[in-house]
Image (spheres, rainbow, N blue to C red):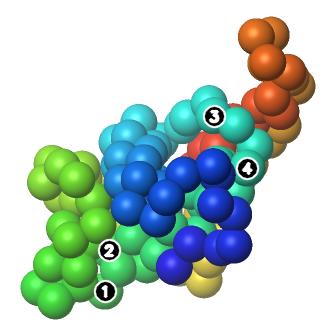
Amino acid sequence: MPGTRKLGKTTDQRMAMLRQQVTDFLGNGRMETTYTRAKEIGPMAEKMITLGKKKDLSAYRQALSFITREDVAKKVFDEIAPKYAEREGGYTRVTRIGPRRGDAAEMAVIELV
């Protein structure tokens, strides 16, 4: 599911970080992170919303295997996915907000459209 960015971590560390960030993003609807992480989070979050649009037990279990909190998975299926029922994709938006003060990493805001 993720792209080719390794983000300076091993595979298991990277997947754990991305799972947690996708869970937090879907729970809040908005997140500020680095631009490269935001570009990785977007497709994963869209996949979870697409699973939410299916509205069946199999899709719910697939979402629970990736999302780390059950209340967020329930929110995706009950609140977020119905908002995008007629939309075919493009549920997220990544906006650059400039460099971070400490290390000049390019920062971005990822949000649900």
Question: From where the camera sits, is residue 113 visible?
Answer: no
Tally of marks? 4
Q: Secondary structure at mark 3?
A: strand
Front tag of 4 and 1: 4
Residue in the picture at 54% in, 37% down: 30
Hey, what amino acid is under mark 2? Answer: Gly
- Ranked by sequence position, the earlier of labels 2 and 3 is 3
Residue tagged 1? 54
Given the image, on which type of amino acid does mark 1 rest? Lys
| Callout 1–callout 2 Cβ contact below 8 Å | yes
Nearer to me, 38 or 50: 38
Tell me residue 60's x, y (percent). Answer: 18, 76
Residue 102, image x, y percentages:
76, 10
- Spatial CA distance of label 1 from label 3 is 29 Å
Between label 2 and label 3, give the one nearer the viewer: 3
Residue type, mark 4 in image:
Thr
Residue 10 vs residue 35: left or right? left
Q: CA distance from mark 1 to mark 2?
A: 5 Å
Q: Residue at x 83, y 33 (%)?
A: 106
User: In the rendering, at what x and y percent does residue 10 appear?
Assistant: 49, 58
Of labels 1 and 3, earlier in sequence is 3
Q: Secondary structure at mark 4?
A: helix
Label 2: which residue?
Answer: 52
On the rendered structure, is 98 left or right of 55?
A: right
